[in-house]
Each structure stands twice: as C-alpha cells, then as structure tokens.
Image (cartoon, rainbow, N blue to C red):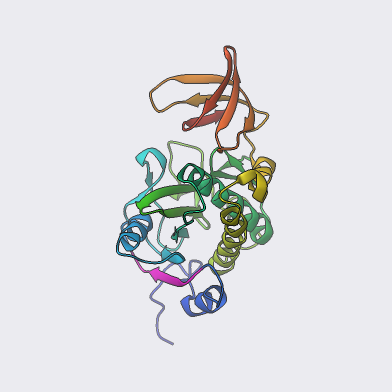
Amino acid sequence: MPASPYTDLDRPPLRVTGLRRALVVPGGLWRRLEVRAETGSTNADVVAAARAGEPEGLVVVAESQTAGRGRRDRVWVSPPRAGLTLSVLLRPGPQVPPRAYGWLPLLAGVALVRAVRARAEVDAGLKWPNDLLAGPAAAKCAGILAEGAGNGAVALGIGLNVTTTAAELPADRPATSLRLAGAKTTDRDTLLRALLRELAELYAPWRDAGGDAQASGLREAYREMCRTLGEPVRVLLPGGEELTGGAVSVDGDGQLVVNTPDGPRTVTAGDVVHVR
C-alpha cells in the first residue's frame, strides 16, 4: 500500500467532489466551490474574484491559510486541515440598503452556531458581534470577518477550529476547538455542508426582506444565541475609550446597547469582555 501523503491521519483533506455534489445544486445559492491546498487569505481571494465580476455564490475554502486576518487586523492562524477556513461571495442586491450589510457577519454567526449545535453537538453561543464560544469554558472557537468588495459585493470569511490541539492554540487569549470542547464529530465535510446550508437558509429571507433583520426573523434568532446579552461587560472601543455596564439589547442595526453608569450607549464596533 502506498504511503499516505498526510502525516496527521486524523486530519484528512476535504472531499471536494462530494461537497460540490451536495452544495452546488440548481436553484441554490452556491454556484461554485473551490478548495485550495494553500492560500494567503480566502477573503482576499473572494474580494479579488468579486472585483473581476464573479457572481454571487462563490465559496473558497483553504486547507492551509498563511495570511488570514480577523477583526482589527488580528492574525488568524490554523495548522493545515485542523479547521474550516472559508469565505463566500454575497451580492445582496439593490433591495438591501448598505447600512443593513452590517447584519451579514451576525447572520454568519447564527448559521455557525446552528451547524455546530446540530452536527458537533457542542454547547455553543455567540459573543457580540460574532465570536463563536464553545464548550464548558465558553472559549472562542471561531471568528468571522466581512469585507466590502465594491459594487455591492461582500466577502464573508469564517475560521473554525475543529481538531486544533491545546498546544496549537494561541497562548495570549482563551481559545478552544470543537475537539477540545467534546464534539461528537469533527468530520469537516459534515460541518462544512451544514454551515453552508444554514447560511443559505438564513440569507434568503433576510435578503428578500430588504435586509430587515426584524422582519426576516434574524434579529430574534441572533438574540437567542447571543451570550453577551444580560451580562456585565467591558467594551474597548476603537478609539481607546472603555465602557462598562450591562449588555441589554441588540438594536435593529445589529449594534450592542450597553447600560452604562452614564446612561445607555450604542456600540457599533469594539472588543467585548464578559465580566465574571
């Protein structure tokens, strides 16, 4: 028997043919699925494709990503085939106003929680705006980044730790993987199919409702999964200001409402810490 090219046999490559057969179907959202052995950034790949005229529905998955980015230009690093690293191209169309695009990463967060709960059977929720928290320690297991690509196009990137070990996780912040959180399955094909199907099922009604998260049911679904609501929090704003108070709501634009000692404040962007 020939030797396997993979030294880590618990991290097999994605089965591309089966994924395409299951996901790229007539009338579906996903039109083209590309799995790349290595790339710098799947989001950068999708942005470039969008600017070259690629239609909605492109999915780019990387088995190894060398220059991945998270929010606020943080680096997202994962060993080859230890997780799911992907970006999708969406073009919501003229019926969705640009201000509603801020809901797309939250929509992806809801899809990710649903997929992880259903397939991995792991207790999971969201820290505002879209960090996936998993397992008993509620540590970060995934991140999401949306980037505009011009002409109404959005690259929506997702990075999920699947079989990442404790030694492979960043030492400077709490993090976990589905395996460490006790997942019933770490089969990446199963998880990717579930995630992309949930994304498509949430995206269609949101888009058809003109990006109205309330009318489409997205806001309520997000509130149910958001672990930040009802918690005392500390929020570091982009300019360096810090807020403390109770997280009480997510408004119609997806912004976090915090009751501070000086009254309610609406947070558009910032790093949230749950104060235990």
| Residue for point 35% across, 61% down | 50
Residue 232 image position (x, y, % from top left)? 62, 24
Q: Is residue 145 left or right of residue 264?
A: left
Up the image or down, 244 lies above or below 190; here it is above
| Residue for point 44% across, 54% down | 157
Residue 172 image position (x, y, % from top left)? 43, 36
Residue furthest toward the front?
Answer: 95
Residue 61 image position (x, y, % from top left)? 43, 64
Choose between 200 and 161: the one closer to the eye. Answer: 200
Q: How many marks?
A: 0
Choose between 224 and 62: the one closer to the eye. Answer: 224
* Location of residue 13 by image quarter: bottom left
Regarding residue 65, the answer to whether it shows in the image is no
Span colored in magenta: 30-38
* Location of residue 233 by image quarter: top right
| Residue for point 50% across, 52% down | 165
Up the image or down, 213 lies above or below 164; here it is above
Does residue 33 show up magenta in the picture?
A: yes
Choose between 206 and 175: the one closer to the eye. Answer: 206
Choose between 188 and 209: the one closer to the eye. Answer: 209
Q: Quadrant of the N terminus?
A: bottom left
Residue furthest toward the top?
Answer: 262
Residue 130 image position (x, y, % from top left)? 54, 43
Q: Quadrant of the C terminus?
A: top right
Regarding residue 268, the answer to whether it shows in the image is yes
